[in-house]
């Protein structure tokens, strides 16, 4: 993590945003975009800005907290692959003038930060309760993402974090050290019981393409926008290798029990439809994997 993102106070946040604004303006000189305004968006794992243009709509500029350029490039490569395989609008990186999708900006202290610019995904967070159709379509969206992941050919150049038993144990260790700040002892005991069940379940899963692959890693309701009633995923900054169940858990966590059943229904029915159509798909499209989902 770059020192730019070390925050201890509200004053630190204001300084980071101000410095990031300068970095964003400097980075935009590396892109062939006729931009008019740079507007601060939010600060989390990345510091993001909305780039407004007159003719080409909006873009999202990200100043990355990680200093691992290979991880950033791998995320962008995964998004490019998804864009080719899925008929759902997703954020994809654009090339700068030298053909790269990642720009390096040197800070006054000699440290470098990496910047990428993404195409903006049209859509809105609904301010009303989701309809049954919208929730069902979230399940279909998950199924499409995971189907593409099953056929994704991993290469040694692809570097993304891994979610699994080890990372889960690490997260629980950190929670054990800090839970007193926001949980009672009784509440933490429930967390521990749930964690034991999760670890038992993970220990029984095989790392084959039916269960495991590249996942979004943070597909909660805040990272799903809707356009004409259809869900679109955003913010793939935490995409990683992991179990598909992790994505499903993120998505259903913010839903009511009945809505969760609809998500699972969308997942299952899409998978069943794919299996039924597989023989015809192979006949019409070869192996059937070239057609967009």
Image: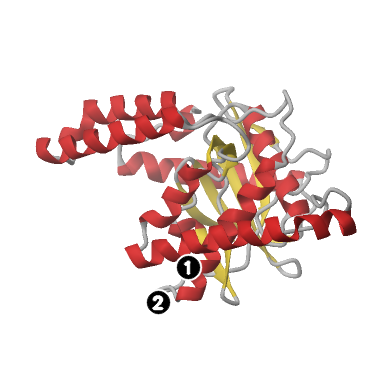
Give the image location of residue 45, x and y in percent: 48, 40
In front: mark 2 or mark 1?
1
Report the disc number at residue 279: none
Whether residue 223 is visible here, answered yes or no, is: yes
Query: Which of the two labelled residues, at mark 2 and mark 1, occupies the earlier sequence position?
Result: 2
25 relative to 16 in the view: left or right: right
Name which quarter of the figure residue 100 lies in: top right
Name which quarter of the figure residue 112 lies in: top right
Give the image location of residue 214, x and y in percent: 61, 39
146 relative to 29 in the view: left or right: left
Q: Residue at horizontal 56%, vertical 75%?
A: 229
Q: Residue at horizontal 47%, vertical 52%?
A: 42
> Mark 2 highlights which residue?
128
Q: How many marks?
A: 2
Q: Residue at horizontal 77%, vertical 58%?
A: 292
Give the image location of residue 65, x and y in percent: 52, 34
Q: Residue at horizontal 33%, vertical 63%?
A: 257
Q: CA distance from mark 2 to mark 1?
A: 13 Å
Relative height, residue 253 to residue 127 (above, below): above
138 relative to 214 in the view: left or right: left
Relative height, residue 189 to residue 88 (above, below): above
Report the disc number at residue 135: 1
Give the image location of residue 285, x and y in percent: 88, 56
- The front one of 149 and 254 is 149
Labelled pair 2, 1 in contact (Cβ < 8 Å): no
Secondary structure of residue under mark 2? loop
Secondary structure of residue under mark 1? helix
């Amino acid at each position: 993590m770059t020192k730019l993102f070390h925050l201890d106070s509200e004053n630190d946040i204001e300084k980071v945003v101000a410095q990031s604004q300068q970095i964003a303006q400097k980075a935009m000189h590396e892109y062939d975009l006729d931009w008019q305004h740079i507007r601060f968006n939010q600060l989390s794992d990345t510091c993001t800005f909305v780039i407004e243009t007159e003719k080409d709509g909006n873009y999202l500029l990200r100043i990355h907290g990680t200093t691992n350029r290979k991880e950033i490039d791998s995320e962008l490569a995964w998004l490019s692959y998804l864009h080719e395989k899925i008929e759902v609008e997703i954020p994809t990186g654009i090339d700068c003038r030298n053909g790269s999708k990642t720009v390096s900006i040197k800070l006054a202290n000699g440290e470098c930060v990496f910047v990428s610019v993404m195409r903006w995904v049209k859509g809105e967070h609904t301010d009303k309760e989701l309809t049954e159709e919208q929730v069902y379509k979230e399940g279909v969206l998950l199924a499409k993402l995971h189907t593409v992941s099953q056929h994704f050919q991993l290469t040694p150049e692809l570097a993304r974090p891994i979610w699994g038993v080890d990372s889960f144990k690490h997260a629980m260790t950190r929670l054990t050290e800090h839970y007193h700040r926001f949980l009672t002892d009784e509440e933490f005991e429930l967390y521990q019981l749930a964690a034991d069940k999760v670890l038992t379940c993970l220990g029984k899963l095989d790392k084959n393409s039916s269960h495991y692959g590249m996942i979004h890693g943070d597909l909660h309701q805040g990272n799903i926008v809707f356009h004409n009633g259809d869900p679109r995923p955003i913010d793939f900054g935490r995409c990683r290798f992991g179990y598909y169940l992790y994505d499903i858990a993120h998505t259903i966590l913010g839903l009511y029990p009945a809505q969760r059943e609809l998500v699972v229904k969308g997942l299952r029915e899409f998978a069943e439809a794919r299996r039924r159509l597989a023989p015809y798909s192979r006949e019409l499209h070869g192996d059937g994997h070239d057609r967009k989902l």
